[in-house]
Image (cartoon, coloured by chain):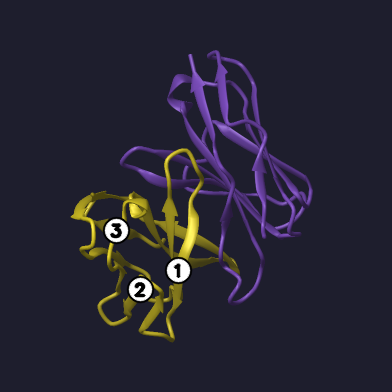
Chain colours: A purple, B yellow
Amino acid sequence: DVKVTQSSRYLVKRTGEKVFLECVQDMDHENMFWYRQDPGLGLRLIYFSYDVKMKEKGDIPEGYSVSREKKERFSLILESASTNQTSMYLCASSLTGTSKETQYFGPGTRLLVL
Amino acid sequence: GENVEQHPSTLSVQEGDSAVIKCTYSDSASNYFPWYKQELGKGPQLIIDIRSNVGEKKDQRIAVTLNKTAKHFSLHITETQPEDSAVYFCAASTTYYGNNRLAFGKGNQVVVIP
C-alpha cells in the first residue's frame, strides 16, 4: 500500500514564525502536491512538484514556498505565518503517466496560527 | 482551467436508502474522474474512479456514472450504512504542460441517519 506521512498532525505557531510542513511518501512517486482544505472551499492546490528540485505554482501559492531535494520528500514552507494561513494542510503523491493520475493523500496537518 | 462543481453541499439520508452526489466539470479534455471519501480526522481516500472511455463503473455498493456530452458525473451509494457518513470529493484530471493534476469539487457532507 502507498503510504504518505506528514510530520505533524497538529501544529500551533505564532504570527511571523517560519513554519515547515514535511511530507514523505514511500512508493517512489514522481509527483507530489500540497493542498489546503478550508470549510466550504474544498481542496485548493498550493504547489506541486513533478520531479526532484522542480516545483510549480498551484492556484493559491501566495505566502508559501516549497522544497523538494529528494524524491520521497516534499516540504511546504510558510516564510512568515499569518492568521489567514490557519487551515488543514494535505499532502498527496502520484505516479506520472497515462492511467496513473490517482493521488494518495496523507492524514493532514492542522495548523493554527495565533 | 478546469472548474468542478459539486451538489448538493450536504445530504442526509436514512440508513438503507440510496445517496447520489452530482458533479459537473468544464474542460471537455478531462479524462479521469476520481471520487474521494474523507472521514473525520483523516486524509481523503480514493473510493472509486472512472475514465472517459467508460460510462459506468460499480464496486459493491458504490457506482459512478459519467455523461461526457453533458460534462457531469455522479456517485451513487446504495443501502447506505452509518459508516458511509463522511465528506465526499469529486475531481477531474487536467493536463498542465503534459503533466496531470486534479481539480476538486468543494465537497459534500453525507450524513446517514440510523
Rendered image quadrant of residue A24: top right
- Give the residue displayed 32% in from the left and 51% down from the top: B82
One can see residue B36 in this view: yes
Residue A71 in the image, given as x and y percentages of width and height: 78, 52
Residue B35 shown left or right of residue A21 in the figure? left
Disc 1 target residue: B48
**Mark 2 residue element:** strand
Q: Chain of mark 2?
A: B
Q: Are marks 3 and 1 in contact (CB under 8 Å)?
A: no
Give the numbered dot on residue A38.
none
From this view, report whether residue B4 is shown above or below residue A106: below
Comes first in the chain, label 3 or label 1: 3
Task: Report the quarter where the N terminus of chain A lies.
Answer: bottom right
Comes first in the chain, label 1 or label 2: 1
Disc 2 target residue: B64
One can see residue B107 in this view: no
Disc 3 target residue: B5
Q: Disc 3 and disc 1: Cα gap in Å?
A: 18 Å
Residue A63 in the image, given as x and y percentages of width and height: 54, 31
Residue A83 in the image, given as x and y percentages of width and height: 45, 20
Task: List the single residue furthest toward the right.
Answer: A70
**Mark 3 residue element:** strand
Q: Disc 3 and disc 2: Cα gap in Å?
A: 16 Å
Q: Identify residue type, mark 1.
A: Ile
Q: Disc 1 and disc 2: Cα gap in Å?
A: 7 Å
- Give the residue displayed 42% in from the left and 55% down from the top: B37
Residue B23 shown left or right of residue A80 in the figure? left
- Give the residue displayed 25% in from the left and 77% down from the top: B70
* Front tag of 3 and 2: 2
Q: Identify residue type, mark 2.
A: Val
Q: Nearer the viewer, residue A91 or A9?
A: A9
Q: Chain of mark 1?
A: B
